[in-house]
Image (tube, rainbow, N blue to C red):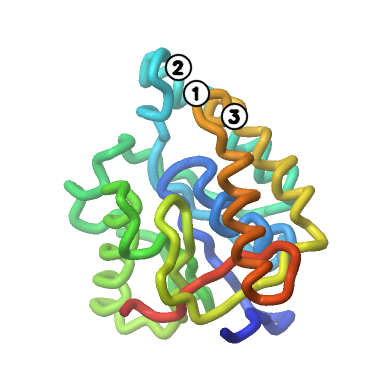
Amino acid sequence: MNELKFKSQDKILIVAPHPDDEIIGCGGLILSYPKQCDVLLLTDGSKGHRLWSPSRTARIRKREFESVMKKCNVSHYVSLGFNDRTLSRIVNCYHGQNLDKYDYVFVPNKCETHTDHRASFYQLVLNRFISCSRYKVFQYEVWSPLSNPTHILDITSCMNNKLEVLELYQSQINELNYIGAVKGLNQYRGLLNHFSFAECYREGVL
């Protein structure tokens, strides 16, 4: 596996279907390169709580997302506000977004079980094909681990910070043990590659 590295002038976009996906899959990357990373949030996350109304959930998750971006020192982020769990019914959720200014775009991997995650990947591939863009696509892990990652990022030095940031998504970690799951995956990835903690990615769209 190749170690993921960037030049100081590289521009990176992290695509997050829902508020928290960006930290689960790329939190170490964002914390390592905050000035080079922009975040594109696709949905309002309104279906992310079993007991709250969609409108209340969307408001709370928006505040959480903004707090996370501030905590990570991410200066540029955009929320498109599509309804949660509807991306598969949208022709192109990237319409109107200038992705050509980026060198790298990170998106959930094509094997993700969540329909919004898969749609964010396949619509990005289609958008890239139609626009003939040259940015490199990297797939990341949320709830479906990559079977064949190509790149790894040592996040040992910022793992504690990643978990602290993830804890800002209180609406989510009170529902599921995200902290334990993320720590376990990153520790597993790290130990297989002689790091304490790591994030893994797959380059390309295959």
- Assign a secondary structure to mark 2: helix
Query: Which amino acid does the dot numbered 2 rest on?
Result: Arg
Residue bearing the label numbered 1: 59
Is 40 placed above or below 149 here? above
Residue at 57%, 24% (x, y): give it: 174
Residue at 56%, 39% (x, y): give it: 178
**Separation of residues labelled 1 and 3 (CA atoms):** 6 Å
Residue bearing the label numbered 3: 63
Q: Residues within 10 Å of mark 3 (few under 14, many from 20)?
A: few
Is 113 placed above or below 43 here? below
**Separation of residues labelled 2 and 1 (CA atoms):** 5 Å
| Labels 2 and 1 touching (C-beta < 8 A) | yes
Q: For residue 126, which quarter of the picture?
A: bottom left
Q: Residue furthest right?
A: 157
- Assign a secondary structure to mark 1: helix
Residue bearing the label numbered 2: 56
All told, the count of numbered labels is 3
Q: Quadrant of the C terminus?
A: bottom left
Query: Which amino acid does the dot numbered 3 rest on?
Result: Arg
Closer to us: 39 or 96: 39
Q: Position of residue 51 (x, y in %)?
A: 40, 13
Q: For residue 92, which quarter of the picture?
A: bottom left
| Labels 1 and 3 touching (C-beta < 8 A) | yes
Is 88 placed above or below 101 here? above
- Which numbered tag is attached to residue 83? none
